[in-house]
Image (cartoon, helix red, strand yellow):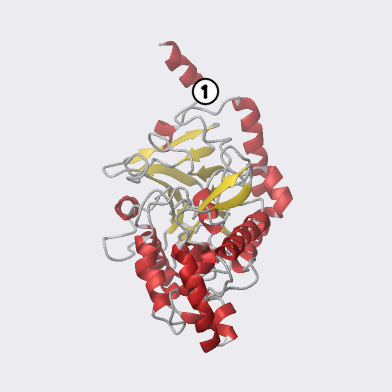
Amino acid sequence: MLLASQHGRTVIGVKAFRPLARLAKSSALISTMQGPDENTSPLSTFTSIQQQYKLPAVPDIIQLKENQRLVCVGDVHGDINALKRFLTVAKVFDGNRWTGGNTILVQCGDVLDRGAEELECFSLLTSLSKQAAEQEGSLICLWGNHEALNAAGLFQYTEGDKEYEEQIGHALDISSLNTKLWRIQFGGNQPSRWASYEPGGLLALPLMAHLKVAVQVGKTVCVHAGLTQHHLDMYGGLKGMNDIARKWIEEAHHRQNNNLGDYDSVEDVIKDANNRAKRAASSMPNCLGGGSGESSPVWMRTYSYPPNMPPRNSEKTQAILDEVLTTLDADRIVMGHTVQNQINAVLRGKAWRIDVGASRGVSSGTPEVLEVIKQPDGKEIVSILTQSEKIPKEEREISEEATMLKSLL
C-alpha cells in the first residue's frame, strides 16, 4: 500500500495488497464472535501502552524567572544518539536523568522521520519532561512538518516501522482485542505507525495534543519554521493556533474504526483507508498544513533560507519579522526546519536558525543548542552552547553586509 500527497490531496494506491483479502474474508467469522464495541471502538480502548509517551500540558506563554535558562534544541529526526548529545550539550541530561533544574527546554519539532528511533526519542523526551516538572523546569515539544505529515498518514520519509510493530502493534495484538485484524483498516500502509499518529489515534491524546505549534518563553518565540503577523491574525495568536492544532489531533475524523477487518472485498478496504486519509488531510488546520515552500508555521522558509546566509530580499523579510515580534513583545524568533552548518542568526540577530542536521538520516551535523538566560536586571543573554565551549551570540550573527563583502573577497 502506498500513500502519497499529490497537489495537496491525499491518495492511496495498491502495492502487494492481495494477501489482506484472505484476512478480510476471515474477519467476518470473528466479528460474529465479538461485540460491536470491539469493532468500532478507538484502539486506545484496548491498551495503555500510549501512556508511556505522555507529555505534560504547558502554557503557550511562559515568563522567564531571574537567572532561569531557556535552551532550544533543533531537529532530531529519529536519532536517539543525536538527541542525547543535544541534551548533554544543553546541560540538562546526565545520561540517565534530568539535571537541568528549572531550565525550560524547547525541542523545535521534527522528532519524526529519517531515522528509526522515533519512539525511543519520544520516550526519553516524555520521561524527562516529567522529571523537569518535578524540579520546576519544563520540556516542551513543538509540531514540525514531519509530525504533521505522520498525523496525515503520509509516510514517505519514514525508515521502517520495527519500533512501532514491536511496541504499539504487539501491545494491540495481545490486548483484549485479541486479533491482528485491526491492521486491515489501514490498508497495509504502516498500520502501527498510522494508528499511533492519526487524529484520535493511540498517541493523539497523551503526546500529540500537547505539542505546540509555537510557544513564547520570555522574549523568545519558538516555532518549527516561522511565524508572521498573518498567522497571529488568522489563528487568534499563539494560544489560538495551539488550540486549533490540539482540537484537530484529538478528534478521530474518520468517524469509526473497523478493528475486525469486516470488509466484503479488497476494494472496500482500499476505499475505507483512502477515505480515512482524506478526512484527516482535508480537516488539517492551515497552521499545520502545506508542503515544501508553503507559508504555514511548520513549513515556511522565509527566515531560514538560504542556509548560512541572510534571507533574500532582507529588507522586506526584516519588516515581516519585526511586525510579528512587536505584536508579541518579543526580541527574537527561534526555528529549525532548514539545515544550517551551525546555529546562526540573521535579520539583525532576531531570527535564530538552530537545525544543524544532527541526525544520521540528515547530515550527522555537530550538535549545538541555543541558550537564553534572564539576568537580574531583566536583560536576556543569548549564547550558543557547543560540546566544548559557550559562544557569544555576536560571533554567530550573519549580516547582509558581511556576506556581500565575503563574496567579493
Task: State the residue in front, 41 or 14.
Answer: 14
Q: Amino acid at mark 1?
A: Glu
Vertical placement of 57 versus 15: above or below? Answer: below
Q: Position of residue 333 (x, y in %)?
A: 55, 43
Q: Residue 125 in the image: state x and y as whole percent.
A: 40, 62
Q: Is residue 255 left or right of residue 172?
A: right
Residue 47: give x, y in percent of width and height. 45, 79
The structure residue drawn at horizontal position 64% and vertical position 51%, both measured from the top left corner, is 287
- Rendered location of residue 335, percent (x, y): 51, 44
SS for tag 1? helix
Residue at 30 percent across and 66 percent down: it is 97
Which quarter of the picture shows residue 248?
bottom right
Between residue 377 and residue 141, name the one nearer to us: 141
Residue 203 seen in the figure: no
Which residue does the image show at 44% across and 15% down from the upper left?
407
Residue at the spot of label 1: 400
Q: Nearer the viewer, residue 176 or 334?
A: 176
